[in-house]
Image (cartoon, rainbow, N blue to C red):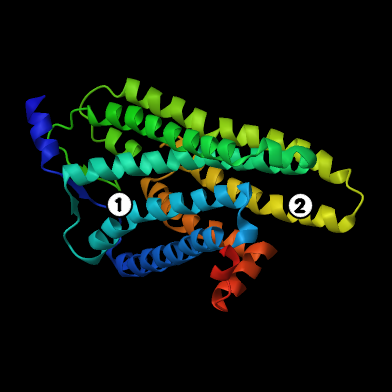
Amino acid sequence: MERANESSLMGFVLLGFSDHPHLEAMLFLFVLFFYLLTFIGNFTIILVSYLDAPLQTPMYFFLSNLSLLDLCFSTSLAPQTLVNMRGPEKTITYGGCVVQLYISLTLGSTECILLAVMALDRYVAVCKPLHFVVIMNPRLCQQLASVSWLSGLVNSLIHATFTLQLPFCGNHKLNHFICEVPALLKLACADTTVSELVLFTVSILFLLLPPALILISYGFITQAVLRIKSAEARRKAFSTCSSHLMVVVIYFGTGICRYLKSSDTYSQDRGKFISLFCTMVTPTLNPVIYTLRNKDVKEALKRLLSGKLCSLRR
């Protein structure tokens, strides 16, 4: 065990896409491009949600939390990925791997719960509009956001700790571009049954239960919207909800492909490209979807660009 721990303290070699050296320069530009988009897009959402008085609502409070999650998630992974793709040195220290694993697991799990909370917000807004202000009060919104962040932290502490306790016995070549649980489990020189069971159970809880609750919420929402007589009101309700639903489908769809598929059903290269999409592209899509499909956000952006946004908070 001591030898295993000594080996792990040497750090890990992130093989990433080194077996496709002709792709690395293009993938470097790919990651850099989407990281910059993620940073600019999510920071803009946070800024306008804070400064623009009409956006001081539960929906945009949760959207700001979502943008903060995506911003931090990308920042925890993209810089190290860019460093490793740029040169022949593709290593990460053991401490760096631990930090990356805990942070990415915390943020990824938090987003699963937060998307379910956002569906609850839309359910109350559409199905109980007369009681919306009372039900979705600022205190409850803060509590729901706190529960989302806390649940992600608890999952990370349990999940990552189980994985990092495994001995690696000198094998420190990680066939991935980031430190994630499935890749680390393949390095272990001990029985990983318990860790794999924890991974599967957590994946069920965070990747299947929240979308199931979201679908139930949207079943009630659809029924309520279809009863609205005004075509304009129906269109606005569907437009608002469809943005969230698109984000849900993309996030959970790629997450399920990433964690719940058997490793025998697709190559490791395909798995790495799915992870690349999940970690680099998905955080970019959220602000794009909400900005392009949301009239309120587009108007707030216009006020921001014209210099009239800050005056709304006076």
Closer-to-camera residue (244/259):
244
Task: Locate the C terminus by quadrant.
Answer: bottom right
- Horizontally, residue 58 falls left or right of residue 186, namely right
Q: Tag 2: residue type?
A: Phe
Q: Is residue 52 left or right of residue 259?
A: right
Which residue is at the front of the view, 73 or 266?
A: 73
Q: Name the residue under label 1.
A: 177
N-terminal of the pair, mark 1 or mark 2, is 1
Quarter location, residue 212: top right
Q: Which of marks 1 and 2 is in front?
A: 2
Mark 1 residue element: loop
Image height of 32 relative to 91, above or below: below
**Residue 71 vs residue 178, the one in the foreground:** 71
x 38%, y 50%: residue:
272
Residue topped by disc 2: 238
Q: Which residue lies furthest to the bottom in this view?
A: 306
Foreground pick, 96 / 18: 96
